[in-house]
Image: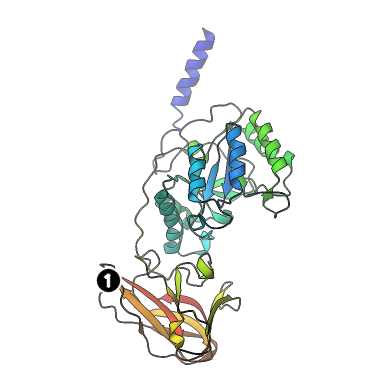
Amino acid sequence: MRRVLLIVMMVLAAGCSGQGAASSQGVPRPSATPGQAGGVVSLTFDDGLARQERMAAELTTRGMTGTFYVLGTRVQAPGYLDQARLAQLAQAGHEIGGHTRTHARLPELHPDEQRREVCGDRSALEAMGFTPRSFAYPFHAVNAAAEAAVRECGYNSGRGKAGVAAERTTPADPYDLNTPLAVGARTTLPEMQQYVLAAEQRKGWAILVFHDYCDDCGPLGVKPAVFTVFLDWLKSRPVAVRTVGDVIGGETRPVPPLKAPSIVLNASLENYFGKEGVPDCWQLDGRSDKATFGRVPQARTGRWAVRVQVTGGDPGRLRLAVKQDDGECAPRPGRLSVWYTSTVPVRFTYSTRTAAGVWSRWSHSPEFPAAPTWRQATWTPPRDGAANVSFGLVLTEPGQATFDDFALR
């Protein structure tokens, strides 16, 4: 009788804890307690690398599930999990979460670009048939604006700050979940075990971070022998192993529609992941044996700038411009600006898009003089009721030019 009474009291106490409800500010809270006395562990995997399929298989054979944070632009790319394999992971009970489109360091970006990176990635994953609820900040880089973007894009959590042994099962901030440092080649089995023991002792939540799975393939490659021994040990511990989404809970929320940005996205040409090394959110037209294009470290700001060189033919045909899309990259019209150095005169090339989605033919601005040092070119094209604009800078005659820091004013 005493035992029954004790169980009833525990159930009533759990029901009054409020962990299954959202806070008054709409922040999701865990849908349930871990279910075991020793806390909870989440095994998370970043970037969607192909070798993580083997890690998922090791989890599945032990009745465990993990959270795989995926970059939408890298699905199908060499060395990454493709859509079919990700679907197999999801069918086995593993969680597919978001990780930005291009592995961007979000605090360094304008809020418009943050939303594009986060919402665009989530939209791409949903289009593949997944229901992403959880997000991880690349490089563990997070600030208030990045948290706001993750919340606005419909995620229920964001895995953030590194270096904390264990998070609380009811985190103070679900959009900046604390984790230990990433598990890598130098991480020993006792160190991995200590993360779990800390969660057990504090009845907390250990969120472990993994990347690659290999022997001697880099600092973030966990050794298979260590990983499997750790999983066997973990299975024997009094902890629950659950996905991040299951611990946090909350409904799956829709992705808000992206508005045309008010800025030039990837304006400093820092993010590169695409065909032939073209900067993200840009397109390149007109390559030939007399025209070359590439990124160079001689940037005005940041790490990279773009250099074009034309030795003959029509130099205006080599055109690097903002991608002509439906507004995900192509911004609203405004006063165009860019910094450049060049051996010959240059000019803006631009095209506008109507609200109906029709792009105009390319037009050009007046010329700007050759510049041996960084010089800013600005120009306001006619808007003519345009909804979006694509623009770049081209040479007026054979020569060389370097571009950086595009902007709308």
Label 1: which secondary element: loop
For this rendering, which residue is in front, 404 or 140? 404
At horizontal 61% and vertical 42% (from top left) the residue drawn is 55
Is 395 above or below relative to 68? Answer: below
* Dot 1 amino acid type: Thr
Image quadrant in which you'd find residue 356: bottom left
Q: Quadrant of the C terminus?
A: bottom left
Q: Is residue 363 left or right of residue 1?
A: left
Q: Relative to residue 121, is residue 112 depicted above or below?
A: below
The image shows residue 266 at horizontal and vertical percentages of: 48, 69
Q: Quick one: 283 or 354, which is closer to the camera?
A: 283
Give the residue at mark 1: 354
Q: Residue furthest front?
A: 289
For the image, the number of numbered tags is 1
Q: Nearer the viewer, residue 95 or 5?
A: 95
- Above or below, comparing residue 109 to residue 382 in the picture: above
Res. 4 in view: yes
- Could you say where residue 265 lies in the image, as x and y percent from the top left? 44, 68
Q: Is residue 141 visible?
A: no
State the image coordinates of residue 368 (x, y, percent, origin top left): 44, 90
Instruction: Give the residue furthest to the top.
Output: 1
Q: Residues within 10 Å of mark 1 (few under 14, many from 20)?
A: some
Residue at the image position 48 percent from the left and 55 percent from the top: 72
**Residue shown at the point (56%, 38%) measured from the top left:** 168
